[in-house]
Amino acid sequence: MNLSRLLAARAAAGRPVTVGVIGAGKFGAMFLAMAARSPGIHVAVIADLAPARARENLTRIGWEAERSAATSLDHALAGGATFVTDNAALVNDPRIEVVVESTGNPAAGIRHALAAIAARQHVVMVNVEADVLAGPLLAAKATQAGVVYSMAYGDQPALVCEMVDTIRAMGLPVIAAGKGTKYLPVFHASTPETVWGHYGLTPEQAKAGGMNPQMFNSFLDGTKSSIEMAAIANATGLLPPEDGLAFPPCGVQDLPHILRPRAEGGILPQKGMVEVISSLERDSRQVVGDLRWGVYAVFEGETDYIRRCFSEYGVHTDSTGHYAALWRPYHLIGLELAVSVASVALRREPTGMSEAWRGDAVATAKRALKAGEILDGEGGAMVWGKCIPAARSLAAGALPIGLAHGVKLLRDIPEGAVLRQADVALDAAQDAVRLRHEMESQARPLLAAE
């Protein structure tokens, strides 16, 4: 609990942490709004495919025009300003300590992470899609290079990892951990054309708000939840359910009751799992005490003494007193990202990191698909991402959702089926495909031995 002090010391010494941001969309803009308020952080360069749009976002979040008026990276570093460019390679200047990758594009995220690691820069991977596609291998490459690869604090996976780590550091076993979301089974079939009705909006309202239908559909159709739970599994060792998340309706008052082993009255096949809870009952009624925006962890009191302490100090437990829960009702997304930047730069410690390949988010057909169709990827109308164990994904040769965009189907796929990599025409020369296959090859003997 000393990051603010360390940042203040760097500011006082005239050596703020230098940062390069790739992608100035919603998450990136939220971080930039806060970075401008921290003298210990200097965002020296912002790379975005649309610099004009990036500048519009900077104006919207309250940046003064002169703050982003630098005409070069040298100018920015010399004067404490920011250079806005469409050239992501400029972020890999050796004077930049931390690269924040927030494009949301898995192929681009992997490419940018590899470039940063090669340049001996710390990586804060906001792009959880890229992290789930090949994060364990990226983390290993960063460690070999002597730099830190980290999840993004403020996003739910990193917050869950922090909660799990804290509970384990106490000596308590974690039984389940995850997040809340709005979920009904019918949402798996949602498309960018139908998504706004599920949010209670008209297409016109959504367009006026600048809302991206494919991105919002990913949150609704279960894909984003699956990606995030796979990331948590890879970072913590908690396991995904064998055939995907159950999304049980659950309020915070029922966390230790529902998220306990099936043999003891809960829904878990075993102890130590990731799961997402729904803010809607299956009949669409709002769950009482829902955790739609938050994160949780359920843990176990293994002895009579520990359980008595739970009782004495008002810890929220199930009726037996054996299982207890902690939760956080919301997350602040990019407003919290400076915690990751400070942690990797000043303590050389990630705020969550993929350690091993344990979970995957695999492309699953929303409808019957025909050979020759081009997949439209995460949040699209054709596939959604299902969270399954990495061992099952590897055995099936499953197609990760991060590679399910812009590729041609080679055969017909029935509705509800998990797609295989052999079902599509992948370009083995692409960095994302190459790195994914490298990770699979390294994981194969390890997963086979488990």
Image (cartoon, helix red, strand yellow):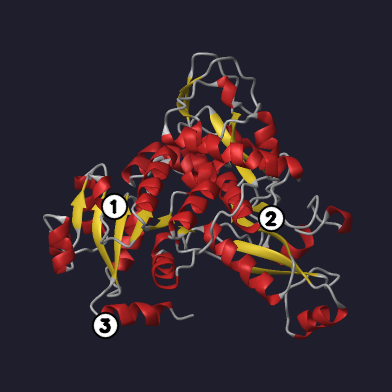
Determine the residue positioned at 55% across, 57% down. Answer: 157
Q: Confirm whether residue 57 shows in the render.
A: no
The quadrant holding residue 173 is bottom right
Identity, as a three-letter code, of the amino acid under mark 3: Ala
Q: Is residue 231 left or right of residue 326?
A: left
Question: Which class describes the residues within 10 Å of circle 1: few (<14), some (14-19), or many (20+)?
Answer: many
Find residue 314 and report its horizontal and vertical position in percent.
73, 81
Would you name the residue on which mark 1 appears? Answer: 92
Residue 39 location (% of width, % of height): 27, 75
- Marks 3 and 1 sit apart, C-alpha to C-alpha, by 26 Å
Residue 164 position within the rendered picture, expressed as x and y whole percent measured from the top left: 64, 65
Residue 445: assigned label: none
Q: Nearer the viewer, residue 285 or 30?
A: 30
Q: Nearer the viewer, mark 3 or mark 1?
A: 1
The label nearer to you, 2 versus 1, is 1
The residue nearer to you, when weighing 145 against 222, is 145
Residue on which the image places disc 2: 238
Looking at the image, is mark 3 or mark 2 earlier in the sequence? 3
Q: Secondary structure at mark 2?
A: loop
For this view, does 123 lie left or right of residue 224?
Answer: left
Near-viewer residue (125 or 445)? 445
210 relative to 292, above or below: above
Furthest residue in direction bottom, as rendered: 312
Q: CA distance from mark 2 to mark 1?
A: 34 Å
Number of residues whose C-alpha sits closer than 10 Å to that of mark 2, classed few (under 14), some (14–19) or many (20 or more)? many
Please tell me whether mark 3 sits on a helix, a strand or a loop: helix
Residue type, numbered disc 2: Leu
Chain-order first, disc 2 or disc 1:
1
> Hey, what amino acid is under mark 1?
Asn
Determine which residue is flagged by label 3: 12
